[in-house]
Image (tube, rainbow, N blue to C red):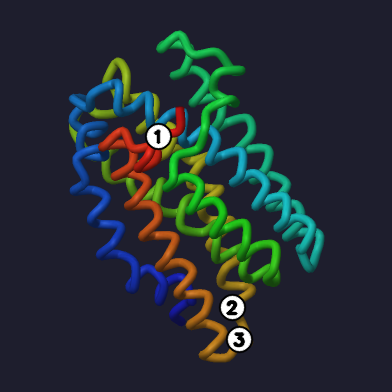
């Protein structure tokens, strides 16, 4: 029997496949990405993850049962420790301190993306929280698995750790947990409600592409503030 996530994947797969053709993502897989671009992604994604953890915390508060609350609690922990530790380790290689990371000013894309998700989570139900967080976790594993298939990519001296993280069994568990809960909250929803959730996943998928563009082009704001 088809699950709601099957329907979602069919809708967003063309967008996600475009990530694999994006020069930033291809650069990680090939090992030739300009490290200044990666540094920009690193700092922006670090502060993105802080807001992402807030989303999971909202999910825990709005959970309808203990299992769901536990899942969101695990996702908060995994984001704040496992995933953000990877960023801190990379930052150390650039000589960036934890304090500098946390003082990073969000780019226009980072601000728009996180504000969109937090707004949905705060004013909607648990199903809106889940739809908002699904794309990031699922699509990063999608990318990680694809790059892991490139010969030698996971062993690259700099980018290999990134690929290992996002293709790992631990990260796959994060993804599977969110997918499972997505299918659960979709049960019994009307077609109009499912369409609403689907559109959230589509929009967050577009935002993910914009985030890769932001990193590739070293974007902050169109008119920098002095």
Q: Residue 186: x, y in percent?
A: 59, 78
Quickly name the residue at label 2.
186
Q: Nearer the viewer, residue 44 or 161?
A: 44
Q: Which residue is mark 3?
A: 189
Vertical side of 105 occupied by 190: above or below:
below
> Across the whole image, how many numbered discs are drawn on residues?
3
Residue 57 in percent (x, y) is at 72, 50
Marks 1/3: CA–CA distance: 45 Å
Disc 2 is placed on an element classified as helix
- 73 relative position to 31: left or right: right
| Residue 224 disc label | 1
Earlier-in-chain disc, 1 versus 2: 2
Mark pair 1, 2: CA separation: 42 Å
Q: Secondary structure at mark 3?
A: loop
Q: How many residues crowd mark 2 within 10 Å: few (<14), some (14–19), many (20+)?
A: some
Which label's residue is closer to the chain start, 1 or 3?
Answer: 3
* Rendering coords of residue 116 (x, y %): 54, 59
Question: Mark 1 or mark 3: which is in front?
Answer: 1
Above-or-below relation of 17 to 153: below
* Vertical arrangement, residue 74 with respect to residue 67, above or below: above
Depth check, mark 1 against mark 2: the one in front is 1
Residue 185: where, in percent of width, then height?
Answer: 64, 74
Q: Are marks 2 and 3 in contact (CB under 8 Å)?
A: yes
Q: Residues within 10 Å of mark 3 (few under 14, many from 20)?
A: few
């Amino acid at each position: 029997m088809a699950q709601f996530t099957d329907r979602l994947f069919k809708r967003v797969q063309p967008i996600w496949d475009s990530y694999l053709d994006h020069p930033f993502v291809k650069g990680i897989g090939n090992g030739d990405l300009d490290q200044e671009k990666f540094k920009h992604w690193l700092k922006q994604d670090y502060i993105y993850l802080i807001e992402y953890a807030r989303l999971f915390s909202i999910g825990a508060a709005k959970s309808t049962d203990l299992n769901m609350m536990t899942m969101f609690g695990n996702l908060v922990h995994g984001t704040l420790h496992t995933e953000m530790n990877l960023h801190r380790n990379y930052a150390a290689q650039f000589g960036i301190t934890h304090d500098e990371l946390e003082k990073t000013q969000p780019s226009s894309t980072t601000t728009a993306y996180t504000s969109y998700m937090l707004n949905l989570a705060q004013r909607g139900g648990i199903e809106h929280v889940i739809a908002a967080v699904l794309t990031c976790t699922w699509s990063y594993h999608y990318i990680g698995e694809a790059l892991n298939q490139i010969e030698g990519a996971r062993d690259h001296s700099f980018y290999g750790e990134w690929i290992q993280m996002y293709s790992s069994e631990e990260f796959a568990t994060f993804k599977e947990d969110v997918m499972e809960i997505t299918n659960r909250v979709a049960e019994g929803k009307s077609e109009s409600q499912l369409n609403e959730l689907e559109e959230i996943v589509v929009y967050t998928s577009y935002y993910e592409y914009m985030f890769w563009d932001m990193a590739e082009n070293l974007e902050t704001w169109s008119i920098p503030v002095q």
